[in-house]
Amino acid sequence: MFMSNESSILQDPHHDQPTITELEHQFQTQENSVKKITDQITTQELSQNLIKTHDQRLAHADAFRAAKKNLQNSLKFIHEKSLSSSSGYHWGQLSCQSCAAKNQMILNAYKEYFLAPEPSAWYAELSEYRDEMNARFQDIKSPTKQDLKDLHAISRKMLRKYVLNYVRDLNLSNDTEISNAISSDMAQEISVEQLIQKIYDLSEPYFPNPDAKKLIMDLQATDISAERASLYIKYYCMILPDDASQQKNFKAKYARMFENQVSHDEVLTAMRKEAHHLNSQKLNALHKELSELQLAQSAHLKNKARKAEKDQRIQNRELSPESVHCNLKRCAIKLNPKEENLECALCDWLNTKGSSKGRFFYCTAEHAEEDFDNHDRNEHQCAAGDRCLYYPQAGSPGDTSASGICASCVQSREGTYYFCSEDCYRHNIDWHANRYHIFDYQREDTNVLEYFRPLDNMKIIP
């Protein structure tokens, strides 16, 4: 029990100055600790977009500083009152009523400091803290210095838990050094101040930029909403010389929200939502533009291919012999291949695709029809050979609308392989690709059948 004036919880500074200094040191170190916590939390929120905790953690620091100031004012008032004549007669005995009243006032001041019903207090959501602190206060019958030490010990223990929870909530524990620093064994071996300092030092590389660090420091220097709003505007909404008009309008809009003292969390949520919407619009526009470019490129390539076919056809005709016989065996009529003649449209198309079979001409439609079966059987054989779905026929009788060549082989210059139908091509693609494709034939985009289409300048006679 400490009931005498010399042994009261808060002694006369003239008699026991070190006690006052020790208390001031505890206040200062604890304030610095919470300040560093708030600093680093704010930094991580800026860099990791944890916007829901920014205003809350900043409020924690404000509430802590206010509580500390109130405690200091209360202790100063109690001390000055104890020196005045109004405090009553001091007996100098263990049963001194003046000392007992003074100690009780000091205890009440600490209870207000440790258990103030402040929703922004750092311990507001730690029910374990309130329960343990209330239980310890209830055990105090006559306040002693040991009681104060115990209360400080509870506060520091819970502050340690607050620090560890904050680190885990922000996923900083993914860093090996930080993870080691907050491990149960190591965290218990060092003081709260050392633990906070270590985490702060290890987390500094996570600062997104020097401006963010300055913002955090400046936020701690004021609790005036208008001044903090100006800091947010400077950090988030400063208009740069090379900003586009859309960016300027965007920043001006949210600068006004900060000026109207809308909370940081609410403004950033709105900023991110609009930025996401604008980015989505921009991406959609880019996708549309890309799609249009792809369509234009596809049309260009098709036109280029048709021109190449036409040029190849002209070149082939120029290189053709002066005369050719009608393809019907019994007909001896000679034809000029450079003139307009009846010929097999499929063979002519294959010729433009690089086939070495050549072109087949007829002097009359009757001769072409008479020779059709023989010509179709000998010249339109499916590349699948005896694996063809229509074997031993050359393909679906009289139907070439679904026939074509393996586009992959043409592109890779492996050759011109004609298939009688899409079904036959799909049925034999593995067998064919294993033998002729020089790339990954299992890729779907490499297995394409280019359908037979008569040349644009060719008239089809039914």
Image: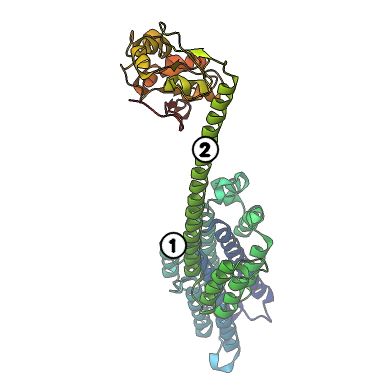
**Total labels drawn:** 2
Q: Classify the position of the C terminus by image quarter.
A: top left
Q: Secondary structure at mark 2?
A: helix
Percent x, y for residue 132? 43, 62
Q: Residue furthest left?
A: 397
Q: Nearer the viewer, residue 406 or 192?
A: 406
* Mark with earlier residue (2, 1): 1
Marks 2 and 1: which is nearer the front? 2
Q: Residue furthest front?
A: 333
User: Can residue 9 be seen?
Assistant: no
Q: Nearer the viewer, residue 423 or 94?
A: 423
- The amino acid type of the residue labelled 2 equals Asn
- The amino acid type of the residue labelled 1 equals Leu
The correct choice, above or below, for 335 with respect to 453 in the image is: above
- Colour style of the rendered protein structure: rainbow
Q: Residue furthest top?
A: 330
Percent x, y for residue 246? 56, 67
The correct choice, above or below, for 271 with respect to 339 in the image is: below
The correct choice, above or below, for 280 with respect to 115 in the image is: above
User: Can residue 281 be seen?
Assistant: yes
Mark number, residue 126: 1
For the point 48% across and 74% down, the residue is 111
The correct choice, above or below, for 228 with respect to 455 in the image is: below
Residue position marked by numbered label 2 in the rendering:
303
Q: Secondary structure at mark 1?
A: loop
